[in-house]
Amino acid sequence: MQIQKYEERLRVAMLQSDVAALDELIDDDLLFVGPGGQIYTKQDDLQLHRSGTQRMSQADWLAVEVRHYGAVCITVVTAQLSGTFLAQPFSGRFRYIRTWEEREGIWRVIAGSVSVVTAESP
């Protein structure tokens, strides 16, 4: 399966807070840096969705760049997002970088980060 299809599955799972799908797509040893510099694990991420602490009302992937390195792929996703986090609304353009690894024919996110894209960013 092309990594873009995995990115689409991840987008839908994030938008729907589909914890079962997220559990399949995220590696157990995930390290993820949030927009404020916080470090999250897989369990942190699943709990954010399970509890409703994070809810997305919009998750549109505007651009997806992919680099393949054998059993590893790096994706850079520019997204338009909106929703709530810790009961505070958010909306804007964000950029994810994710490291995907293939093991036994299954791709999972092993690392990533997200940052706010400012008006001046390309």
Image: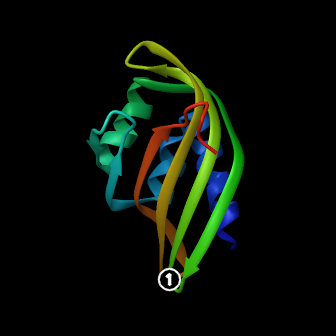
- Image location (x, y in percent) of residue 101: 46, 73
Determine the residue positioned at 37% across, 18% down.
86
The percent coordinates of residue 11 (x first, y second) are 62, 45
Quarter assignment of residue 66? bottom right
In the displayed structure image, the side of residue 63 where residue 47 appears, left or right: left
- Residue placed at 38% from the left, 32% from the top? 48
Q: Up-down: is 52 above or below 97? A: above
Q: Quadrant of residue 54?
A: top left
Residue situated furthest bottom in the rendering: 70
**Foreground pick, 67 / 16:** 67
Quarter assignment of residue 59: top right
* Figure check: 96 above or below 70: above
Q: Secondary structure at mark 1?
A: loop
Up-down relation of residue 87 to residue 107 (above or below): above
Q: Which residue is mark 1?
A: 71
Q: Give how far across and how far down residue 110 sits, in percent.
A: 39, 63
Residue drawn at point x = 52 percent, y = 49 percent: 96
Residue positioned most to the front: 120
Residue beneath the point at 44% across and 33% down: 49
The N terminus lies in which quarter of the figure? bottom right
Residue nearer the viewer, 18 or 3: 3
